[in-house]
Image (spheres, grey):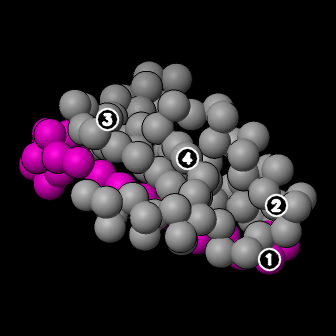
Amino acid sequence: MGIVFLVLVAGELLRLTVQRVFLNGGKGNMLIVVPVSGHNEDAEYLLRSAAAKIRLIGGKTISKVICLNCGMDEETETVCVRVCDDYPFMYTATLSEIEAFYLES
């Protein structure tokens, strides 16, 4: 039991060290774009994985995940919207919405 605990503590210390050294202490901004098209059985997995990456980095980052609608079907879109509602930093958008946003800026 003690060995398992030590392995878990060592893993967490390694994660924190990597975060501090390589990720600048979580002080930068991060944007993950997940393009989804057609009928995609893995859409929920892809979005939740992106959310886990954002949470892993943590810190004081301004982080966002955009689910890019590249012509997904209705069922996949429903799943994506439901997953995005679970996270305050996750949004769905079409390519034209993103283009309009950046052209206005």
Instruction: Tell me the amino acid under the disc marked 4.
Output: Tyr
Residue visible at 31% across and 35% down in the picture: 58
Residue 30 as seen in the image, left or right of residue 77 = left
Question: Given contact means CB atoms under 8 Å apart, are the residues at marks 2 and 1 in contact?
Answer: yes
Q: Cα distance, mark 1 to mark 4?
A: 18 Å
Specify start and end residues of the magenta stretch as a single range.
Answer: 18-40
Q: Return the x and y of residue 13 as percentages of the image width and height.
A: 25, 35
Q: Nearer the viewer, residue 5 or 84?
A: 84
Residue 58's mark?
Answer: 3
Residue visible at 75% across and 64% down in the picture: 42
Q: Residues within 10 Å of mark 1 (few under 14, many from 20)?
A: some
Residue highlighted by disc 1: 38
Residue highlighted by disc 2: 76
Answer with mark 2 or mark 4, whichever residue precedes in sequence: 2
Q: Nearer the viewer, residue 79 or 22?
A: 79
- Quadrant holding the C terminus: bottom left
Instruction: Tell me the amino acid under the disc marked 2.
Output: Thr
Question: Given contact means CB atoms under 8 Å apart, are the residues at marks 1 and 4 in contact?
Answer: no
Quick one: SS at disc 3?
A: loop
From the viewer's perspective, is the residue at label 3 or at label 1 nearer? 1
Q: Cα distance, mark 3 to mark 1?
A: 32 Å
Q: Cα distance, mark 2 to mark 3?
A: 28 Å
Question: Given contact means CB atoms under 8 Å apart, are the residues at marks 3 and 1 in contact?
Answer: no
**1 vs 97: above or below:** above
Residue 38 quadrant: bottom right
Residue 88 as seen in the image, left or right of residue 75 = left
Question: Given contact means CB atoms under 8 Å apart, are the residues at marks 2 and 4 in contact?
Answer: no
Q: Return the x and y of residue 102 as percentages of the image width and height.
A: 33, 63
Q: Is residue 53 visible?
A: yes
Residue highlighted by disc 4: 91
